[in-house]
Image: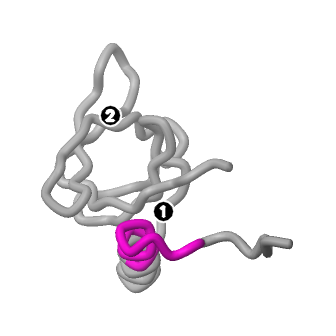
Amino acid sequence: MCLGIPGRVIERHDDDALPMGVVDFGGVRRDVCLAYTPEVAIDDFVIVHVGFAISVVDEVEAERTYALLSEAQLADELGTPTDTARAP
């Protein structure tokens, strides 16, 4: 399974002609390649997978994804099964 995490672009720069940016993931900031999303602007939200921004999303969608990820984290901490497989 692939997981893309939403983040907010807070800086743009080029690295050897490759568009790059700093993306904020709720306080954690990482350098991200923006080659697949050249239209992205500062304060836009992107979905990031393995260091690449793969799509631009609106803030509402980013917040919805954050909420789902938070629920999944809580389910893991509580030991709640997250799959639909049933024990025999």
Residue at screen point 79% across, 75% down: 86
User: Sequence order check: which comes first, mark 2 or mark 1?
Assistant: 2
Label ID, residue 20: 2
Q: Quadrant of the C terminus?
A: bottom right
Residue at screen point 40% across, 34% down: 33
Asked whether residue 62 is in view, the answer is no
User: Identity of the amino acid at label 1?
Assistant: Val
* In magenta segment, residue 73: yes
> What predominant SS class does the magenta segment belong to?
helix
Tell me where residue 54 appears, x and y as whole percent: 54, 49
Mark 1 lies on residue: 56
| Quarter of the rendering containing residue 83 | bottom right
| Range shown magenta | 71-81
Q: Nearer the viewer, residue 20 or 17?
A: 20
User: Is the image coloured rainbow, by chain, by secondary structure, or in one colour?
Assistant: one colour
Q: CA distance from mark 2 to mark 1?
A: 14 Å
Q: Secondary structure at mark 2?
A: strand
Q: Secondary structure at mark 1?
A: strand
Asked whether residue 61 is in view, the answer is yes
